[in-house]
Image: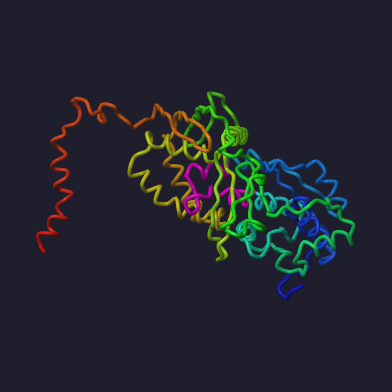
Amino acid sequence: MSDNVPDNITKVVLAYSGGLDTSVILKWLIETYKCDVIAFSADIGQEEELDHIEEKALKTGAKAVYIDDLKEDFAENYVFPAFRANAVYEGRYLLGTSLARPIIAKRQMEIAKLEGADAVSHGATGKGNDQVRFELGYLAIDPYIKIIAPWREWDLNSRTALMDFAAKHGIDVPVTPKKPYSSDRNLLHISYEGGVLEDPWSRPPEDMFTLTVSPQDAPDKPEIIEITFKKGNPVAINDENLSPANLLKELNMFGGRNGIGRIDIVENRFVGMKSRGVYETPGGAILRAAHMDIESITMDREVMHLRDSLIPKYSEIVYNGFWFSPEMKILQNMIDQTQKNVSGVVRLELYKGNCCVLGRKSDESLYSEDFATFEDDSVYSQKDAEGFIRLNALRLRIQKMMK
């Protein structure tokens, strides 16, 4: 252990997935700190087998196991707020992993309080964003919590070393070929990075994709759906009211079978390096397109432009792990104010990787055919435009005249 490792640890709450890394971490914590370990697994829609996690954690040495279904909380209180903001990092990434970390950190800290634990632990490496997101969340909730990040402390720095540790301690790890990349899944998306993807010139293998079919293999017939919004949040698909988690799951199915939501990007990590990531966000891609469109007829121009100017900042705050920061609260409150009239229905066509808006309607619409028409009208005097233009051109004319 390094000199700055927390001491006097008696009980640790570990964010536990049941995979190789966190299984080894569980046993390593017990051996290194001679402490009790509480395993916590959050179900946020990763669709992974959770039935045997409790049995496996207890067998590895956990004193207790929490398995919490957080899918509705995740969709309603983390995904939907970000989509009300049209959040997108560096123009393309819909923040699937970034939004998942604060809800895990929050529940982990609640369990730490319930259990009287004096430390929390996670399996994030010392090179990525997740260590920052988890730990900023922990410290925002309890500034005195002790944090153990094994990847920054131990000498088990290879898969072989982890496998050897597991074998030595009788940890049941499935003997399967390692995928040539790592992946992380939740209700909003699935991400892939590392391994064969580290070469940004190399094309992702087609058999890697999980949520979406290739656009080339998508149906030859377009699929049309309607999404109903109320105050910026989606509430129904094709007139069927759905809970936040079920609505997002349904959109994932629509998008997935039509090849929508794949991106391949090189992004800037908060820690300073560039990283290539491939993402599938089928439901999120549809939802963002629909939300932006219903805003187009319900939101005031200057309010929209002001909010749009803050999208990069909002997205950076989420990406960098400052979900529980004061600046995030201020931004979210302001954005939610802009959504009070964002209600209505958007009709979309899904076809071979494309999501096209076919129409939109709203009782809160600011669009007026009487004003917008190219036909004869009695509500707008085109003559008024002359003074409007000349006043706006005044500074340009003066600048040229003075030269």
**Is 91 a magenta residue?**
yes
Q: Nearer the viewer, residue 243 or 19?
A: 19
Q: On the rendered image, what quadrant is the C terminus found in? A: bottom left
Horizontal side of 36 relative to 276 (left or right) equals right
**Residue 89: horizontal and vertical position, in percent?**
50, 52
Q: Image point 74% across, 61% down: which residue?
A: 118
Q: Nearer the viewer, residue 143 or 29?
A: 29
The image quadrant of residue 202 is bottom right
Q: Image point 29% across, 27% down: which residue?
A: 369
Q: On the rendered image, what quadrant is the N terminus found in? A: bottom right
Horizontal side of 66 relative to 225 (left or right) equals right
**Residue 335: horizontal and vertical position, in percent?**
45, 45
Horizontal side of 364 relative to 86 (left or right) equals left
Q: Image point 50% across, 27% down: which residue?
A: 226
What segment is highlighted magenta in the picture? 77-103
**Residue 4: horizontal and vertical position, in percent?**
71, 73
**Is 30 a magenta residue?**
no
Q: Image point 58% across, 60% down: which residue?
A: 275
Q: Which residue is at the far left?
A: 401
Q: Which residue is at the far bottom?
A: 3
Q: How is the image coloured?
A: rainbow
**Residue 207: horizontal and vertical position, in percent?**
67, 44
| Total count of labels | 0
Q: Nearer the viewer, residue 153 or 339?
A: 153
Q: Nearer the viewer, residue 274 or 85?
A: 274
